Amino acid sequence: MPEEQRVFPDPNDLGRIPALIEQLGGVDVTFGGIGITGHLAFNEPQPELTAEQFAQLPTRVLDISPETRATNCVGDLGGALEDMPHKCVTIGMKEILSARKIRLAVFRDWHRAVCRRAAYGEVSAAFPATLAQNHPDAMLYVNANAAQKAY
């Protein structure tokens, strides 16, 4: 992908992403995975919010949950928890859910339970991936590993 087409959220300019999306006429497709807590792009659960409130959360700086830090360090950093960041800047659920299409993929052993909850669980801010159930064109791609019985 050409460097000028790579856009990352900036903690010092959180309004840049929403403004760019509006300027470009919206997002055609959001690609991503589902985290252990059901998060999409580090939009960690906030069970005190309604699904509607959570769906409106914008690009922002967040704390990464201990569960996400632990899971990600095992899968991506060889278990080096001390090297896993504590904070992130994330594109918001508002931007993710406003895409014309959402494509999520799961492939790890622990995704077996996560994908089932995302697809069939109650739509809730307690498990953010469930909000994609209300999207008119969302798909969940599951490989043979993640498709196995959870336990």
Image (spheres, rainbow, N blue to C red):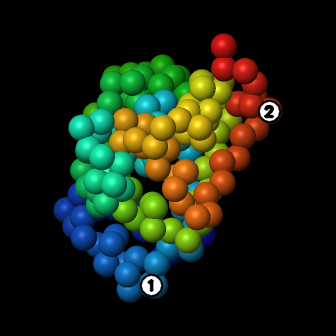
Name the element at disc 2: loop
The quadrant the C terminus occupies is: top right
The residue depicted at 52 percent of the width and 56 percent of the height is: 134
Q: Position of residue 104 (x, y in %)?
A: 61, 50
Left or right, residue 33 beside residue 22: right
Left or right, residue 39 beside residue 134: left
Depicted 28 relative to depicted 58: above or below: below
Instruction: Identify the amino acid type marked 2.
Output: Ala
Residue 35 visible somewhere in the drawing: no
Quadrant position of residue 52:
bottom left
Quadrant position of residue 92:
bottom left
Q: Residues within 10 Å of mark 2 (few under 14, many from 20)?
A: few
The quadrant the N terminus occupies is: bottom right
- Tag on residue 124? none
The outermost residue toward the left is 12
Q: Position of residue 87 (x, y in %)?
A: 27, 40
Residue 9 visible somewhere in the drawing: yes
Pointer 2: what residue?
144
Q: Position of residue 6 (x, y in %)?
A: 48, 68
Name the element at disc 1: loop
Depicted 74 relative to depicted 143: above or below: above
The residue depicted at 24 percent of the width and 64 percent of the height is: 14
Left or right, residue 46 beside residue 36: left
Instruction: Identify the amino acid type marked 1.
Output: Leu
- Tag on residue 24? 1
Depicted 109 relative to depicted 101: above or below: above
